[in-house]
Image (tube, rainbow, N blue to C red):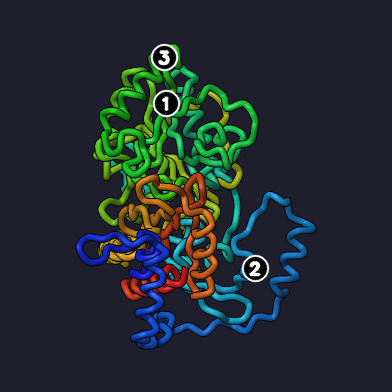
């Protein structure tokens, strides 16, 4: 946080002639005296930044008001269904990287429906594909033949390295990770799973065990799951020392299991945990250790896949590894309820010993929409776009970090970024109250970001991948404006 010279003078005192030290009281007297002798020039009030222009006029809204909706939510939805902001927004329309509330007010969406809107809100190519398929055939399940599911599976498999060529479609990231864990246990013949602290892999009874954040875990049996140290370069015990973190995986297997494990699961870029990119080289070492213990390696790409990181199409590629199983969701459907598990034929075959079925997985509408997403990402070169805009945004955020002490860390790649706020850079004390205040201020400046990390002190910046350099500049200027007013 920026600190004025006068406040430093009052906190620390000052030095007079011949090295004499003034205490804060004397410093205050001299400061007041000098102010009376030479009044400071009046600095004009700073104007807030202006949002980039955008050619879209939202439709007039005639639905329920936000207050009415909130009242009905409280009456008919579970109290666990949370919402953002002291006065929650009633979002009624979206177009590309922008959202509109009931009054037609435009917001820059820097969170993409929790990293789900990849191509942009209501992208015309995806909307048209979904509408046309809906008119023709909505649902059959896999008991009949249908072109969309196999066409989509073939296109998705073409994006995968190695022998990752068999696709199972599900409806969410949680379902994908449940299925991946089942595959790992069946294929290996072992039960023990290894996951990272600070990870998020879902909220079902099974994936809650894999998740490594107490804020998301209910007190139920975890089921033979071990959490190892998180290779977090900013907060981790060993900094960026991948060897030390990987050694702890080996020790966990040796001392906490029979010596044989089912598998290891990790996000390369932890999403809910606050956009933490794992220490360089960690996954290669961890994968080697787990495979020697009979386990398979699962990459959770629910948030980091499809070119969002800019440098690579998949997050795990930044660590130069090929997993045995890859899970994905969110951006795969641009908002459609769609997830997938991609694995090798050998691992996929273990499910054939029983009936494995998913009623809605790969339904014609979602398959057509998912295929349209892949085509849009390629046609509009969104991976390269994320690399370009993301690099510009990271540079600007790091410049902002030099100006405001409250920014402890800027991390991530492409449009998968995190800004961690602290009250003390040395101690890395989470700036919880300040984060909440800035969160509200940014909303008032028409900017919507996410929050993450165990203490909720990390701004998650993961917008639709059509987000521009002008949008990035507006975001940083707004953060500067809001932080300067703390």
Q: Which mark is residue 87?
A: 2
Q: Nearer the viewer, residue 83 or 454?
A: 454
Image quarter of the N terminus: bottom left
User: Residue 85: in sight, yes or no?
Assistant: yes
In the displayed structure, 482 sits above or below 192; it is below
Residue drawn at (42%, 26%), measured in percent from left and top?
263
- Please report contact status of discs 2 and 1: CB closer than 8 Å, yes or no: no
The spot of residue 274 in percent (x, y) is 43, 49
Position in image of residue 260 (x %, y %): 41, 15
Q: Residue at x 47, y 25 (%)?
A: 226
User: Label 2's element?
Assistant: loop
Q: Secondary structure at mark 1?
A: strand
Mark 2 and mark 1: Cα distance apart in space:
43 Å
User: Furthest-left residue in view?
Assistant: 18
What residue would you read off at disc 3? 255
Q: Is residue 362 above or below residue 10?
A: above
Residue 290 seen in this snapshot: no
The dot on residue 263 is: 1
Question: In terms of depth relative to the viewer, which is nearer, 214 or 75?
Answer: 214
Q: CA distance from mark 3 to mark 1?
A: 16 Å
Circle 3/circle 1 CB separation < 8 Å: no
Q: Earlier in the sequence, mark 2 or mark 1?
A: 2
Could you say which disc has been placed on residue 410 in the image? none
Residue closest to the far right = 75
Which is more foreground, mark 2 or mark 1?
2
Mark 3 burial class by Cα count in 10 Å: few <14, some 14-19, many 20+: few
Closer to the camera in the image, 355 or 460: 460
Pointer 3 or 1: first along the chain: 3
């Amino acid at each position: 946080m920026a600190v004025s010279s006068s406040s430093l003078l009052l906190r620390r005192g000052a030095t007079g002639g011949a090295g004499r030290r003034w205490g804060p009281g004397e410093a205050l007297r001299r400061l007041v005296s000098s102010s009376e002798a030479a009044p400071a020039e009046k600095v004009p009030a700073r104007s807030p930044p202006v949002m980039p222009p955008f050619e879209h006029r939202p439709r007039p809204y005639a639905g329920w008001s936000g207050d009415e909706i909130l009242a009905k939510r409280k009456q008919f939805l579970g109290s666990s269904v949370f919402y953002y902001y002291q006065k929650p927004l009633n979002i009624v329309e979206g177009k590309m990287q922008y959202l509109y509330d009931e009054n037609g007010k435009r917001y820059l969406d820097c969170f993409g429906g929790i990293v789900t809107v990849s191509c942009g809100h209501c992208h015309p190519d995806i909307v048209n594909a979904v509408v046309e398929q809906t008119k023709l055939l909505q649902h059959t399940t896999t008991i009949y033949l249908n072109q969309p599911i196999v066409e989509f599976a073939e296109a998705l498999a073409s994006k995968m390295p190695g022998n990752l060529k068999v696709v199972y479609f599900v409806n969410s990231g949680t379902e994908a990770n449940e299925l991946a864990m089942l595959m790992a246990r069946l294929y290996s013949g072992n039960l023990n799973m290894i996951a990272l602290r600070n990870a998020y892999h879902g909220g079902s009874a099974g994936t809650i065990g894999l998740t490594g954040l107490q804020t998301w875990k209910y007190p139920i049996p975890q089921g033979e799951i071990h959490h190892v140290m998180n290779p977090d370069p900013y907060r981790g015990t060993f900094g960026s020392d991948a060897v030390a973190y990987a050694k702890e995986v080996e020790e966990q297997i040796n001392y906490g299991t029979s010596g044989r494990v089912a598998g290891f699961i990790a996000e390369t870029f932890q999403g809910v945990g606050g956009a933490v990119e794992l220490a360089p080289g960690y996954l290669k070492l961890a994968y080697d250790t787990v495979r020697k213990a009979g386990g398979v390696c699962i990459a959770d790409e629910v948030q980091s896949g499809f070119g969002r990181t800019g440098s690579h199409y998949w997050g795990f590629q930044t660590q130069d590894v090929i997993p045995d199983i890859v899970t994905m969701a969110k951006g795969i459907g641009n908002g459609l309820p769609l997830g997938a598990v991609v694995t090798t034929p050998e691992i996929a075959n273990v499910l054939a010993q029983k009936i494995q079925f998913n009623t809605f997985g790969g339904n014609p509408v979602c398959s057509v929409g998912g295929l349209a997403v892949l085509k849009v990402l390629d046609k509009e070169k969104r991976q390269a776009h994320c690399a370009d805009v993301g690099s510009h945004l990271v540079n600007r955020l790091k410049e902002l970090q030099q100006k405001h002490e409250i920014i402890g860390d800027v991390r991530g790649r492409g449009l998968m970024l995190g800004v961690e706020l602290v009250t003390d850079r040395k101690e890395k004390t989470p700036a919880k109250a300040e984060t909440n205040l800035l969160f509200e201020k940014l909303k008032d400046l028409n900017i919507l970001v996410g929050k993450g990390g165990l203490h909720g002190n990390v701004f998650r910046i993961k917008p639709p991948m059509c987000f521009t350099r002008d949008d990035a500049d507006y975001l940083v200027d707004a953060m500067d404006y809001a932080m300067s007013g703390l």
